[in-house]
């Protein structure tokens, strides 16, 4: 009996020792995990502190105020975004600013305008698509559709929360307050945009009826052209293609106004229109110098626009070779890159 009791006591002592050892191991592991998490968090805090210091230095270099930097940093972090992107990418900047405007009732509108200007986000080249209704330029014309009716409008003004569309016709539309309307407009050299918005208020200013509609980022974009166009200004020699006398070419110099991989727009003084005698469907030769290369291309007149002192012709390239198209597309791409760079640097 005594042997059994001794054996039990021995087993219990061994078990207690093993349990104590196990608890010590678990405690050490938990302690090491805790130390690792503290060190990791400390490194994260140090890194964020360093990144914010670097960010504020960049803010200063871009001639922005410390308050602007604090706002962009705070709301970028809240949105889980890289704060530096708000200084380089307009879409990221607008998301961050929108968050600031939504959370702060007394947001500083002048400060936001100054930030846009200094970052080069107040100007959007015509070949860059709009990402928000805030990007729509003042005086942009369009149409508002409601209840099967359509009215000509133009963007009269805008702030950080609302856009203000003025009616171009003196119509009584007080009945649409609180209703959702559709706005459609054509942006030159870009696309057709369609958006919907609720009319929050209607008021009269300078004898015109103005609709107050909230901003938003949901816009339908309908691409009108297959190729991007770029504005240009260089001479082009043109000649009608004669079917009766192929060798008899009469050349006239015109001014190129824009070009794309699909065609070119040329303009001449209106006095030369009769001499040129170009109609829609007329085939012509075009000679011009582009990016250090001589181009001789065939084209067809697809539209004619008469102005007060000039006449412009839209020419579609015909049977364009891949090498020729590549030269034009590369030129357009390089010019777009230059314009993007200028758009950022134009405020210094």
Image (cartoon, grey):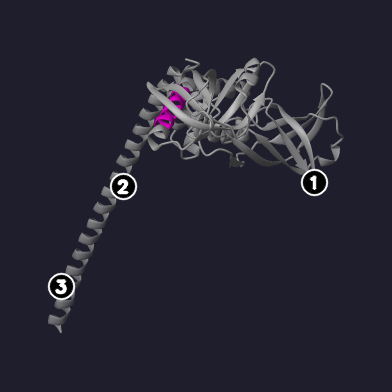
Q: Which image quarter is the N terminus in?
A: bottom left
Number of marks in the image? 3
Residue 232 seen by the camera: no
Q: Which mark is residue 148?
A: 1
CA–CA distance between discs 1 and 2? 67 Å
Residue at mark 3: 10
From the top left corner, tell me how far across and down residue 144 is, in percent.
75, 38
User: Would you say the magenta stretch is mainly helix, strand or loop?
Assistant: helix
Tell me which label, 3 or 2, sits earlier in the chain. Answer: 3
Mark 1 touching mark 2, by CB under 8 A? Answer: no
Specify whether 53 is left or right of 131.
Answer: left
Q: Residue at x 85, y 41 (%)?
A: 175
Report helix, strand or loop for mark 3.
helix
Say few, some or many: other residues with alpha carbon within 10 Å of mark 2 (under 14 / 14 to 19 / 20 or more). Answer: few
Tell me which label, 1 or 2, sits earlier in the chain. Answer: 2
Tell me which label, 3 or 1, sits earlier in the chain. Answer: 3
Q: Which mark is residue 34?
A: 2
- Which residue in the rendered view is the most extreme toward the bottom? 1
- 3 vs 1, front mark: 1
Report helix, strand or loop for mark 1.
loop
- 1 vs 2, front mark: 1
CA–CA distance between discs 3 and 1? 95 Å
- Which residue in the rendered view is the most extreme toward the right? 172
Report which quarter residue 105 is drawn in.
top right
CA–CA distance between discs 3 and 2? 36 Å
Q: Which mark is residue 70?
A: none
User: Where 206 sits versus 301, above or below?
Assistant: above
Q: Residue at x 60, y 22 (%)?
A: 276
């Amino acid at each position: 009996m005594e042997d059994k009791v001794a054996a039990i006591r021995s087993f219990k002592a061994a078990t207690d020792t093993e349990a104590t050892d196990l608890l010590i191991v678990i405690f050490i592991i938990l302690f090491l995990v805790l130390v690792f998490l503290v060190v990791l968090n400390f490194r994260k805090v140090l890194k964020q502190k360093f990144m914010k210091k670097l960010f504020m230095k960049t803010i200063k270099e871009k001639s922005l105020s410390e308050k602007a930097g604090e706002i962009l940093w705070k709301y970028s972090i809240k949105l889980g975004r890289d704060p530096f992107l708000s200084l380089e990418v307009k879409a990221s900047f607008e998301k961050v600013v929108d968050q600031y405007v939504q959370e702060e009732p007394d947001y500083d509108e002048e400060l936001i305008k100054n930030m846009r200007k200094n970052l080069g986000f107040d100007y959007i080249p015509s070949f860059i698509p709009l990402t928000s209704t805030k990007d729509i330029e003042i005086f942009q014309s369009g149409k508002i559709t409601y209840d099967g009716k359509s009215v000509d409008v133009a963007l009269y003004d805008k702030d950080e929360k609302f856009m203000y569309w003025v009616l171009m016709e003196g119509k009584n539309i007080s009945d649409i307050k609180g209703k959702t309307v559709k706005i459609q407009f054509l942006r030159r050299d870009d696309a057709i945009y369609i958006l919907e918005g609720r009319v929050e208020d209607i008021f009269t200013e300078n004898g015109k009826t103005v609709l107050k509609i909230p901003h938003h980022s949901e816009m339908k974009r309908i691409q009108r052209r297959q190729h991007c166009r770029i504005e240009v200004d260089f001479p082009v020699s043109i000649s009608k293609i004669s079917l009766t006398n192929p060798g008899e070419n009469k050349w006239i110099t015109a001014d190129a106004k824009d070009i794309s991989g699909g065609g070119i727009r040329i303009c001449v003084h209106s006095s030369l229109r009769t001499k040129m005698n170009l109609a829609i469907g007329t085939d012509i030769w075009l000679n011009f110098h582009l990016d250090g290369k001589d181009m001789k291309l065939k084209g067809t007149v697809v539209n004619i626009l008469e102005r007060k002192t000039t006449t412009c012709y839209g020419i579609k390239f015909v049977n364009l070779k891949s090498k020729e198209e590549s030269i034009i597309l590369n030129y357009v791409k390089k010019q777009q890159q230059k314009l993007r760079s200028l758009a950022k640097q134009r405020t210094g």
